Amino acid sequence: MSDESAEVIGGNDAPVVSNTLAADAPAEFTTNQAAKALADLRWKRNNESSAEGAETATADPELSGEDNADPEKDPGETKEAEAVKDPPIERPKSWSKDEDAEWQSLPRAMQQKIVARESERDKGVTRSQQDAAEARKAAEAERATIAEERKNYINGLTAQDKILEQEMVERFPNIKSMADLEFLANEALRASNEGDATRAAQIQAYLMAFNTHSQKIASVRAGLEDAKQRQTSEERTKWADHVRTEGAKFAESLSAADKAKINDLMAAAPEFLEERGFTRQELNKMWMEGEKITLHDHRIQSLILDGMKYRDLQKAPKAVAKSDLPPVVRPGTSKPAGSDQSEQVKDLTRKLNETGDIKFAQQLRALQARRAS
C-alpha cells in the first residue's frame, strides 16, 4: 500500500473510495498499522457525513412559489383584493348612456387617459367660468363705486351751485339783468368823465367781482351738466344690458310651442294689458324707458292672480267628457235652455287642454261668469 492513499474495494458494484493519509503517516505499513489507519479514515469520514446531514436537516427547506405563499390568505381573497385595488372607471359625463358598451370595451389605460383629459378640460372650463364671474363681479362693483362717486359729485356740485346762487343774490342785489350791467358800466364811464375817479373805481370793482362770481357759477354748472350727461349715458348702457339679458332669459324659458306663437302673443300683449287698466303711454315708458311699477299696483296683482289660476288649471287633472248623450230634441222644438253655452264650455275646455293657450282660458272664464249671472 502506497503512502498517498488507501483503496477499499468491495464487490463489483461497490464504489471506489479514495482517502488521503495524514502528512505524518509512515512510508510503509505493517498489517496492523494499515488496518488501524483504515479504521481511522472510515471513522473520520462517517463523522463528517453525519455533521453535513445534521446541517442539511436543520436548514430551512426551500419552498416553491405556491408553498411560500401566506397560508392564512385565501386565493379568493387575493383576487378580491386585486379587484378592489383597481375598480372600474366610470364613464365620463360627456359620454352618453348609449355609448356605455363602447366605453367598457376600451382598454383601462385608454380610459384613464380620456378621463384625465376630460377632467383637465372640465377644470379649465370651470376656471374660465369662475374667472369670468369674478371679472363680472369686479366690473359691477367698479361700476357701482363709480356711480356712487358720481352721484356724490353731482350732489356736491348741486349744493355748491345753490350756495353760489344765494351769494349772488346777497352780494349783487342791483344786478338782475343785462340792462342793469349796462347801466352800471355807463355810470362808471360817466363818473370817470366827470373826474370822480373814486366812484368810477368802485363801480368797476363791483362789476369785476360780479363777473368773477358769475364765472364760478358757470364753471360749477358746466361740471354739473357734464356729470349728468355721463350718468345718463351709463344708465342707458345699463338699461340696454338689462333688456338684452332679460330677453335672453325669457327666450330660454319658452317651450317649443311657446316659441312658435310668441310673436303673435307679444303683438296682442298691449291690447290685453289695456284691458287691465294700463295706458299706452304707461306701457311705452315701462318698455322703452324702464319706468318702474310696484307689485302693490292693483293691475300687477290682478295679472299675478290670473297667472296663478292658469298654473292651477294646467296642473289640474284633465277633464273627462261625460259619455251620456244630450237630450233628444224632436223636430220643430227648441233646444233645452243653456245647451248652447254648455257646448261652448266643452269646446273651450277642449281647446284649452289641447293648446294651453291663455286666450281660451280667458274666454272660458268670461263664459262661466255670464252663466253664473
Image: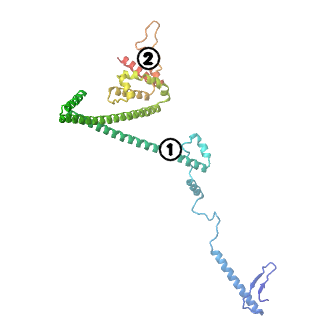
Q: CA distance from mark 1 to mark 2?
A: 56 Å
Q: Tags 1 and 2 in contact by the CB under 8 Å rule?
A: no
212 lies left or right of 268: left
Q: Which label was assigned to residue 344?
A: 2
18 lies left or right of 140: right
211 lies left or right of 27: left
Is residue 301 placed above or below 6 in the rendered structure?
Answer: above
Relative to the observer, which residue lies in front, 242 or 122? Answer: 242
Q: Residue furthest right?
A: 12
Q: Residues within 10 Å of mark 2 (few under 14, many from 20)?
A: some
Three-letter amino acid code at the position of disc 1: Val
Q: Which label was assigned to residue 281?
A: none
Residue at coordinates 39% horizontally, 19% vertically from top-left? 366
Residue at coordinates 64% horizontally, 75% vertically from top-left? 57
Residue at coordinates 72% horizontally, 86% vertically from top-left? 41
Residue 229 coordinates in the image, percent (x, y)? 36, 33
The residue tagged 1 is 125
Secondary-structure class at tag 2: helix
Q: Which quarter of the picture shows residue 66?
A: bottom right
